[in-house]
Image (spheres, helix red, strand yellow):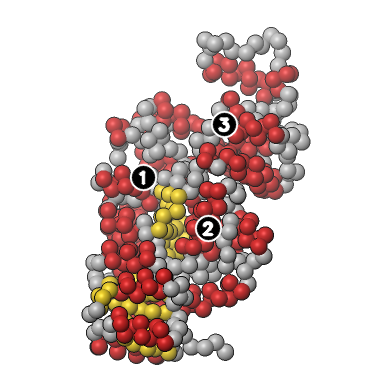
């Protein structure tokens, strides 16, 4: 039978201290109480606790002193701080110092019980995880992440690569997963930010709960509030039944807000309130719905610059950026290319029911010299196309042709009557001749093993060309393709297209 958890409550107001004590005693915990920093340390020096709940302001000091000392002495207690309403800076400072979670005064007792239960569960599970730690070799594969087992190791191993930048990322994931502090994953498009977010979830005590991923840039602005917070029946046209939002769906787990930098300002203020209050109000409802979620967000944008430009709220930025994980670009970890190619080819071949093709050392060397601005996503697309058009055991790529795959021996089989394009001839003029050999009427090319990936790549190339020819003005590009602005925005976000400025457009060509 598991022992009851020991809780230390620290608050200088006797009435509140008694309320917290009674609430926890009813939950079956063993509770001790203190009214000051010095009194709290008398209790801590006399025994061990599972969780410490402390007010931020105390008569003889700050609750932060307790957190710092617990961290310095390497004690195992999980700390929960209570801050006054609107003291976001204090909460962020406490989380960065190592606090497990925070509560805003006046404290909602239902939320209070949930946060304490989560802290106790995390503390009591930690020793078991350490005892069941994986063998050293397994830990090395995961990137020096002691104490991470099961689904956490599997998630870390999906982050392929053993370079120093990737080992640092994996180590940081294992550390930040232990608490409830919000995490901001920063990196270029195609670097694998969602995989990092999933690894944070898998390594945490919430791994058994849901992981809900949201692309903030792909939701129409008029639907954002309903999608995030839910809606009650009849609250708007077409609402025929009650519907939960992302916050309710992620209850007990992790809510991943991808491309958070694309969220409109009006929605940013509502998101900030939901994060601060730990509750949401569905459209058409008069009741606040308490939610227990951990927030992990990601962006390819420089949010500092977005804040300075007035496009992102500073208070929301500080709330989300408690802990940052920077995902390296592929050009900064080219030593991982062989392992990445092997893993991607194995998955592509498995999905298509094909044998895994061989990647020659020469091709790997050429890949290492290729820019790969689209990072792992571009590499995956290159390999997808190569596998789809491959007809032998060894894979071939035409990296000079914009990443277009070429069938082995194609150049050698071209007749002498079709010379290569001259220096003054544009590539488009030579395309029909090349196409005649790639797709002869008597021998059509092999069918792609992943139709969706193939179609996505074709659509991406068309959109990039239209954007380039229209000076990255989305309105003009949409008009050329017979699309609405909303449609092209959605496709740009879905396909991960970025402009030279790292956004879907330039300041001079702003169209929204």
Residue at 64 percent across and 66 percent down: it is 134
| Residue 49 visible in rendering | yes
Q: Nearer the viewer, residue 456 or 295?
A: 295
**Of 505 and 98, the residue lying toward us:** 98
Residue 280, by quadrant, is bottom left
Mark 1–mark 2 Cα distance, whole angstroms, equals 24 Å
Task: Classify mark 1: helix, strand or loop.
Answer: loop
Q: Secondary structure at mark 2?
A: helix
Q: Which residue is mark 3?
A: 370
Residue beneath disc 1: 302
- Image height check: is 123 above or below 497? below
What percent of the width, then of the height, locates residue 75? 45, 75
Helix, strand or loop at label 3? It is: loop
Q: Quadrant of the N terminus?
A: bottom right
133 sits left or right of 54 in the view: right
- Assess disc 3: are there few (<14), some (14-19) or many (≥20) residues with their C-alpha within 10 Å of its C-alpha: some
Task: Say which residue appears at 50% left-offset and 35% top-offset.
Answer: 373
Q: Nearer the viewer, mark 3 or mark 2?
A: 2
Q: Which residue is mark 2?
A: 171
Image location of residue 18, percent across then percent down: 30, 89
């Amino acid at each position: 039978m598991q022992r009851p958890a020991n809780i230390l409550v620290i608050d200088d107001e006797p009435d509140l201290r008694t309320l917290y004590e009674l609430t926890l005693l009813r939950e079956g915990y063993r509770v001790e109480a203190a009214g000051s920093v010095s009194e709290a340390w008398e209790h801590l020096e006399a025994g061990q606790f599972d969780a410490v709940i402390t007010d931020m302001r105390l008569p003889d000091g700050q609750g932060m002193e307790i957190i710092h000392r617990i961290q310095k002495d390497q004690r195992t207690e999980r700390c929960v701080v209570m801050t006054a309403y609107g003291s976001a800076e204090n909460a962020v400072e406490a989380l960065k110092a190592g606090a497990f979670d925070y509560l805003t005064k006046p404290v909602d007792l239902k939320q209070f019980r949930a946060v304490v239960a989560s802290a106790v569960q995390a503390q009591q599970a930690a020793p078991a995880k350490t005892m069941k730690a994986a063998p050293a070799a397994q830990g090395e594969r995961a990137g020096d992440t002691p104490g991470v087992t099961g689904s956490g190791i599997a998630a870390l191993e999906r982050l392929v690569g053993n370079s120093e930048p990737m080992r640092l990322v994996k180590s940081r994931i294992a550390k930040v997963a232990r608490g409830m502090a919000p995490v901001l994953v920063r990196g270029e498009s195609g670097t694998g930010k969602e995989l990092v977010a999933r690894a944070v979830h898998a390594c945490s005590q919430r791994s058994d709960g849901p992981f809900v991923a949201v692309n903030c840039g792909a939701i129409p602005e008029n639907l954002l509030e309903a999608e995030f917070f839910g809606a009650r029946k009849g609250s708007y046209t077409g609402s025929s039944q009650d519907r939960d939002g992302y916050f309710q769906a992620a209850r007990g787990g992790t809510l991943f807000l991808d491309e958070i930098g694309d969220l409109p300002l009006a929605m940013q203020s509502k998101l900030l309130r939901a994060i601060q209050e730990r509750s949401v109000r569905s459209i058409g409802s008069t009741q606040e719905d308490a939610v227990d979620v951990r927030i992990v967000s990601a962006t390819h944008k420089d949010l500092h610059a977005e804040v300075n430009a007035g496009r992102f709220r500073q208070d929301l930025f500080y709330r989300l950026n408690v802990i940052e994980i920077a995902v390296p670009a592929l050009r900064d970890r080219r030593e991982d290319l062989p392992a990445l190619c092997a893993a991607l080819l194995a998955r592509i071949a498995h999905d298509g029911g094909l044998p895994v093709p061989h990647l020659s050392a020469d091709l790997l060397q050429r890949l290492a010299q290729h820019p790969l601005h689209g990072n792992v996503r571009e590499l995956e697309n290159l390999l997808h196309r190569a596998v789809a058009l491959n007809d032998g055991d060894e894979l071939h790529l035409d990296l000079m042709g914009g990443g277009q795959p070429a069938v082995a021996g194609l150049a050698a089989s071209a007749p002498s009557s079709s010379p290569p394009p001259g220096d003054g001839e544009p590539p488009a003029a030579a395309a029909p001749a090349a196409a005649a050999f790639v797709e002869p009427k008597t021998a059509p090319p092999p069918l792609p093993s992943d139709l969706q990936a193939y179609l996505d790549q074709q659509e991406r190339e068309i959109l990039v060309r239209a954007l380039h020819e229209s000076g990255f003005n989305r309105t003009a590009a949409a008009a050329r393709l017979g699309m609405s602005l909303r449609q092209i925005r959605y496709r740009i976000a879905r396909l991960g297209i970025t402009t030279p400025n790292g956004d879907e457009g330039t300041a001079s060509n702003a169209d929204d």
